[in-house]
Image: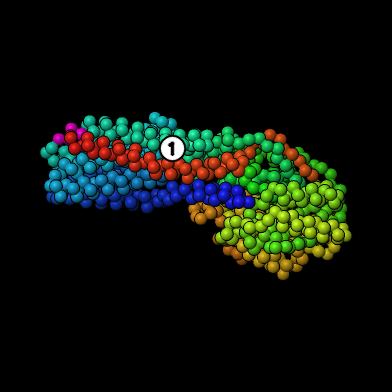
Amino acid sequence: MSNEDSLNNSMDSALKHYSSMFFLPKLKRAILLLVVFCIVVVGISTILIFPSLGGLFYSLILGMVLFISTLLLDYVTSKVFLGADPIYILRRILALSLFCWIIWSGFLIFGSIFSIIFNNNLLWFKFVFLGFSAVLTFRATIFIATSSAGIMRNLIASFVQPLFYILVFVIFWQSNSNSLSFQFLPFLSVSSILGFFSAILFIFLLDRLGKQKYDVPAISLFRAFMLNWVVGLNAPFEKLLEKLGKNELIEVMILKFDALKPKAAIIVPFVHPGPFKNIGSSLLPSQLKNSFEKEFNCDACVPLGILGHELDLASQTQNKKVIKSVIEASNFVTLADKASPFVRTTMDSITSSCQIFGKNAFFSFTLSPQTTEDLPQELGKFVRDEAKKQGIECSIVVNAHNSLTNKTEMNISLKTLKDVALKSLKKSLSLPHYPFEIGIKTVFPKEFTLKDGMGPGGITSLVVNVAEQKTVYVVIDGNNMLSGLREEIILMLKSNGFHEVEIFTTDTHAVSAIVLGRRGYHPIGEVMDKKILFGYILKAAEAATTNLEPCRAGGIQIFVPEVRVIGEERLNSLSVLVDSALQRAKKIVFPIFGIEGIFLIILLTIL
């Protein structure tokens, strides 16, 4: 479990670094700030060195030309130069131009100050060229690192605007000064070449770090993540995961209930629904649920199995492979027409629930109200082996994953988990079996989105009625839930006529890397209106009760061969690479760009 905590911490850290790059202003705000820097800041810097009525006029013209040309050139860049890149829409290019003007404005202000101190207006003009070099290098670094439009298009997008701006500044200088500016042409050529190669060197050293340590190009990873984060493209990132992954034999457990036709199903793939957003198997719970329901015309639910990040699928292609195998295997005959009542056993803050349907058992584990995160695979294997010794042919073992506190670690022993599982099994086996009824209903809360923590699978309530005991299993498509919420939901449902209740989340990572914040996602109940959430849960449970009918149960275990997974070790490598690349960037940014700056300053002093 400590390894799992370490991986989660690494992934959280990676997501925080990535998310910090996307605090971009909205379009109107970006345009307003461009007005401030292009007209106001540039105007102040020029008025300081040309304090006259003519200087004021030319300063206003300069600022207006810079502002209008920024808008026009950004539009051309987004539509023509980088039109093939889905990241660089007009708003993001305007935001980049804003950052460039912030950088250039700093040089202009310092140039004005030094010009006044040393009574030499030429110093301001030299700072204009230094600002050009800084902005050109900055744009080249950003575009080459993040854009997938191709090297030539990225170069054009990097060079066109700074070159146009420097031309405007030269015209302004010639209009207000008798000195010539042609002596700066060598500087323009040298700084352009040096800026481009400095950007290339910076990116090469970061890429080299990824290839040496983790066999992953750092910039390719960064670009693939940006394409996913910004525009939702999963293919570039999944291509990396497929390359780094390995083939595994994937196990899936299916517990199906039939009346005259299929009634309901609990499907538990031994796949972790991650790593985040729409990458890999993050959406598998809702995709598997949806595909099964379409094929068999009945509701299904996909709670989390007993496993961790060691079995994240590498791509959507692998999801389809698992789903296809489940559909093909689910036409089996169900024979068990009797079930035991639901039982619950608690020991040392661990709760295990069990219900047996003929020779099929459904187990679940929770530590609620303490943190309940991923549980070790060894626990699931132990439970299935022990149940088999008692004549249980198929055991579905589920991690309820239904409580999250500020403390992410779970200080529990595997021995205690095994002990409580055995007690739960023995208790359930000791009870008589009775005919049972099944009802199921799924609701999709329209008020809650991925940003709120609700996955596309919605809320499914499966009701089991045995010997006048009405039990409801509530499966919510989310990544865990706030501590204490489980207990509140249980109390609410029991007060509405249900005898036993257990709550599960699917642990879908479709909600992860969606929002900026401490976790990168919201667990169920953190930002949701609790009253609305409870209303939907009760609605699903009551609707399931109204369609109760006698059923038969059956369970099977299937294996899907040659499924590409990205294991815990590789995921950790990708996550750690972000931190490593950031540390490398901090070490090389000043030597590379600092040397470039010093060389250009020396060059300017001799011109």
Q: How has the structure been colored for display?
A: rainbow
Side of 601 where 258 appears, left or right: right
Given residues 84 and 211, the one toward you in this image is 211
The answer to which image quadrant residue 203 occupies is top left
The answer to which image quadrant residue 568 occupies is top right
Residue 576 located within the stretch drawn in magenta = no
Q: Does residue 507 appear anywhere in the picture?
A: no
User: Measured from the top left, where is residue 23 in percent x and y?
Assistant: 43, 51
User: Measured from the top left, where is residue 70 in percent x and y?
Assistant: 32, 42
Residue drawn at (48%, 40%) of the image: 222
User: Measured from the top left, where is residue 597 in percent x and y?
Assistant: 28, 39
Residue drawn at (81%, 64%) of the image: 469
Magenta stretch bounds: 180-184
- Magenta portion: prevailing SS class: helix
- Find disc 1 in the rendering and name its residue: 206
Q: What kind of residue is marked 1?
A: Leu
Given residues 453 and 77, the one toward you in this image is 453
455 shown above or below 193: below
Side of 506 where 558 appears, left or right: right
